[in-house]
Image (cartoon, rainbow, N blue to C red):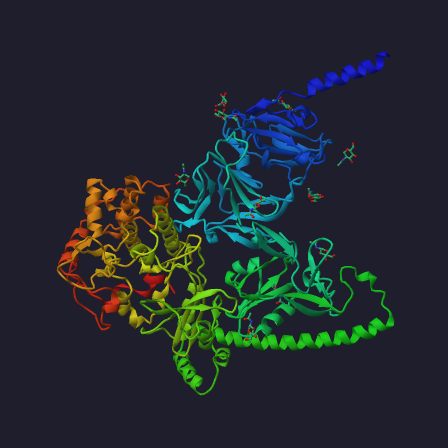
Amino acid sequence: MSPFPLLLLSLLSSLHVSLSGPVATEFIYPNFTASYFHYVDTNGVFLTSRNGFFQASMFNPMAQQSSFYLSLLHTHTATVLWSGNRNKPTSDSGFVSLTAAGLSVLDQNGTVLWSTPKLSAPVEAARLLDTGNLQLLDKSNSSLWQSFEHPTDTFVSSQLLPAGSYLSSSVNDTNLAEGDYRLSVSTSDARLAWIGQDYWRLSNDVRSIKDSSQPVLGMVVNTTGLYLLASDSTIVFAVSLTQSAFRVVKLGSDGRLTIKSYTSVNSSSPISGDFIAPSNDCDLPYICRSLGLCAISGNSSTCTCPPLFTTATNRSCLPGDGSTLASSVSCTTTDSTMSVSYLSLTNEIGYFSIKYMPATTSGPDISMCRSLCSNNCTCTGYFYDNSSMSCYLLEKNPLGTVFSSSSSSGQNAIGYVKTYVGSVPPSNPTSSSSSSHTVAIILPVIAAALLVTAILYILFVRWKKKEKKKAIGKSKPSPKNIHLGQHKSSSRDSGYTDQEEDSTDDVIIPGLPTRFTYEELEAITENFQTKIGAGGFGSVYKGELPDNSLVAVKKIEGVGVHGRKEFCTEIAVIGNIRHINLVRLRGFCAQGSKRLLVYEYMNRGSLDRPLFSHVGPVLEWGERVEIALGAARGLAYLHSGCERKIVHCDVKPENILLADGGQVKISDFGLAKLMAPEQSALFTTMRGTRGYLAPEWLTNTAISDRADVYSFGMVLLELVRGRKNRSETSADNRPTQSDFSDNSSQTQIEYFPTLALEKHEQRRYIDLADPRLQGRVTDEEVGKMVRIALSCLHEEPALRPNMASVIRMIEGSLEAWEPMVKSLNFLRMYGRGFAERPEPENGLGFSPNFNGGSWTGTSSSTANVSWSPSHLSSQQLSGPR
Ligand SMILES: *[C@@H]1O[C@H](CO)[C@@H](O)[C@H](O)[C@H]1NC(C)=O
Ligand SMILES: *[C@@H]1O[C@H](CO)[C@@H](O)[C@H](O)[C@H]1NC(C)=O
Ligand SMILES: *[C@@H]1O[C@H](CO)[C@@H](O)[C@H](O)[C@H]1NC(C)=O
Ligand SMILES: *[C@@H]1O[C@H](CO)[C@@H](O)[C@H](O)[C@H]1NC(C)=O
Ligand SMILES: *[C@@H]1O[C@H](CO)[C@@H](O)[C@H](O)[C@H]1NC(C)=O
Ligand SMILES: *[C@@H]1O[C@H](CO)[C@@H](O)[C@H](O)[C@H]1NC(C)=O
Ligand SMILES: *[C@@H]1O[C@H](CO)[C@@H](O)[C@H](O)[C@H]1NC(C)=O
Ligand SMILES: *[C@@H]1O[C@H](CO)[C@@H](O)[C@H](O)[C@H]1NC(C)=O
Ligand SMILES: *[C@@H]1O[C@H](CO)[C@@H](O)[C@H](O)[C@H]1NC(C)=O
Ligand SMILES: *[C@@H]1O[C@H](CO)[C@@H](O)[C@H](O)[C@H]1NC(C)=O
């Protein structure tokens, strides 16, 4: 062996030894450099936190050996939590450098690819904390810069994502550069957007609960859940998650926001039940690429193309007629040789951003919507909603995935995709080897296009003027409108159809649900054949829509109603309230003086049936808890989840509907505002049903959401007992169904809330449980529910918990409050009052002219009860107009 290679060998090995330094723990100090090549033995890791659960590394995602990133990793899962040079990867000999000036990443020739900004003091050390935060420290150990304040696509427990900041996804698993999706936190919400178009909002997610309306400081995750917090740590939004010590919130390269939860920071696999948003694959904006049609099948999704479209080689969908999508044409290359055409998507096809987009305009005529789109080169298509007459223009952005929506999903808008036909593809204009006869074709086309544009422009200008006039008319409701309404009902008699009436009608409100004619509803309900219920507002009938889905049609009768326009305004509000625990309004009819509401059908009927009737299976304790939770969530959403606070005013078992699959939904919300103002006195007597009415209804105190909390407390007690709170016990101790229907002295009248209060004082809760449960519930379980119920019944509204706290108490993430007996003593008086002189049943028994008198059996302070509606503005009932 010649000495030369030997020398080289020893040189190389000594080089290797000197280069692959030991992995530092917690601190590195200036004049430190590291490259993947130096640390190949540790796979690029050059620094670990003291606890070893986090690492800093020159990381090589998916081991592709070409792109290296300065990254912080979660050791046990190799999850990238942060990366410095995400947009400029380096090679295996590119390196990270820590100097007094800061941290930077350089390529092998020493060119800086990324660095921390200019710092206010020289760096003394870099420290990787046990939370996964990398800090640059000055002489006094205070932080000059930290990775937690510059998140990339991930944040973890103990990190705050401040309002105004965002996470942005990576392009894919190997390329960590910024992709197209963002999770941004604002002072009021958190949202996911794809190239500027929203596709998810925390406030719209059924898993979130809104607690307050304070401005948001930022988003955090901790052991109990995900929160948006205000500056004083008040919870604004909360999502409860299973208890776990460490969580990683990551915005994936596919646009999914995933929360992975670990029992401890050193576990390597997440506990199941991940939070994923959006929860439905087809709500992802690009899962089937451009114009692909996403459909849910089983627990996954499939991609096809909509009718009239064909699959392109890149898996996007292109017009089947060979025309060019407007979205793939740059506005600078369009010219008048191309004529605009539209391909219609069917009414079963929805688009993700319509849900979050305000309507561009609304008008009775779809052609206006189309001409707006045709006249604007940046418009790539539009959706028009027949029932609300709303027009949504899609602009500038590329077109994403469309989804298959049954009519029950609530998107009624039909989409039209803009294309250009009759011309060479504009993407390569040079290829237009113009022969003489193409010119012969093109010239007339140009002329025609110019003409069409001119006509459309004139139409547009005229329409704009009309719109302006309308806007002026709308801002000042004049007596003319009322006159119009009267005129309309008489015009119907003179042979006009309702359709014609509508087209000349001012009632154009974005977001209206489907409008039915009375005749249609007659057909749907087979002439109102099957009556399934009757409530304060009228009778309810079963019906079947043409798409075979069942509905409940409520005929509002016997009470004065607003004029059509006011009615429609309210319907638009109610119709836009979507929550899994609220019965959905699917449509309405406002024809002449007829007012009908079409609701989704709940096949198991209202809660009073299984709870109070003694036929059929007993509701098990677990089911009762689920029902309580569902109802509470629905109410919490009404109180704080929607734009305007809605107080239900009539929470009772009859208004809690059940359906197969454990569905629990609140019905009849928002109806308060359908009443004409002069009806509100009647309303107070009609609505709040006796036995569930909060004491403040009898005084001049303002009605707030806590009135619903009181009623809910009453319902909770009924869930515990399995019968009405005010019920008769006949001699054989079997409750009868109708309470207070007769006043015979043979029956003993029991007021259950008083009994519950007494048993609470004795701490003997099990006596309160429904005897039909025969011991299948523990004293502890009943006690918790009774304590929650009693706290809801506190006489002073301010001492009652809000619905969000009630939810947490039932779930167990919040200790049940200790009821304040002092604030519950009024129940004993109620009890005595009821025992002595039973009242008429609910408002249906009242005379509509009832407008004064005292409510016996209540505390004496309310002896002089006024039924004046003055203390009950319609605002308090469902928020400002
Ligand atoms: C780091 O290197 C610079 C220039 O090479 C030198 O001036 C400085 O003293 C060094 N610092 C330390 C802490 O070694
Ligand atoms: C860096 O060096 C490599 C090889 O030495 C060379 O190919 C490359 O062009 C250089 N890059 C820059 C940006 O100077
Ligand atoms: C900074 O922190 C390190 C490690 O905790 C400690 O040894 C050092 O004394 C601290 N320096 C100052 C100025 O506090
Ligand atoms: C990631 O994206 C880059 C382009 O940005 C592409 O070249 C690469 O093939 C992608 N990798 C995977 C695994 O899809
Ligand atoms: C998690 O954070 C929320 C909001 O600040 C707080 O209410 C809750 O108590 C925290 N959970 C724990 C276990 O600290
Ligand atoms: C995780 O850490 C805890 C203490 O922090 C330790 O008891 C446990 O053994 C560790 N588990 C693993 C898998 O390292
Ligand atoms: C859901 O998908 C998984 C595979 O991802 C499959 O194993 C499972 O059977 C599916 N479940 C249902 C109910 O389809
Ligand atoms: C797919 O290919 C078509 C042409 O074949 C092109 O117009 C379109 O922009 C491509 N879409 C994507 C997302 O690459
Ligand atoms: C086209 O639409 C864009 C985006 O809404 C708007 O800014 C622009 O003014 C419109 N152009 C015309 C001519 O209406
Ligand atoms: C929209 O209205 C037109 C005219 O009234 C009607 O022909 C069409 O079927 C409606 N479309 C839907 C989806 O209701």
Residue 122 can be seen, yes or no: no
The residue nearer to you, when weighing 717 against 193, is 717
Eyeballing the image, is 785 above or below 405? above
Residue at image position (36%, 71%) is: 556
Above or below residue 60? Residue 258 is: below
In front: 285, or 191? 285
In terms of image quadrants, where is residue 748? Answer: bottom left
Q: Residue 798: x percent and y percent?
A: 27, 50
Counting labels gives 0
Q: Is residue 498 above or below residue 25?
A: below
Query: In this image, 824 relative to 673: left or right?
Result: left
**Residue in view at x 67 percent, y 60 percent:** 327
Whether residue 870 is visible here, answered yes or no, is: yes
Which residue is at the front of the view, 329 or 602?
A: 602
Q: Quadrant of the N terminus?
A: top right
Q: Nearer the viewer, residue 268 or 352?
A: 268
**120 vs 614: above or below:** above
Q: Report the quarter where the C terminus lies.
A: bottom left
Percent position of residue 751, x then y? 20, 53
Q: Is residue 758 left or right of residue 659?
A: left
Q: Position of residue 109 (x, y in %)?
A: 74, 31
- Residue 854, quarter of the rendered image: bottom left
Q: Position of residue 817 (x, y in %)?
A: 29, 43
Using the rendered view, name the quadrant where residue 370 is placed: bottom right
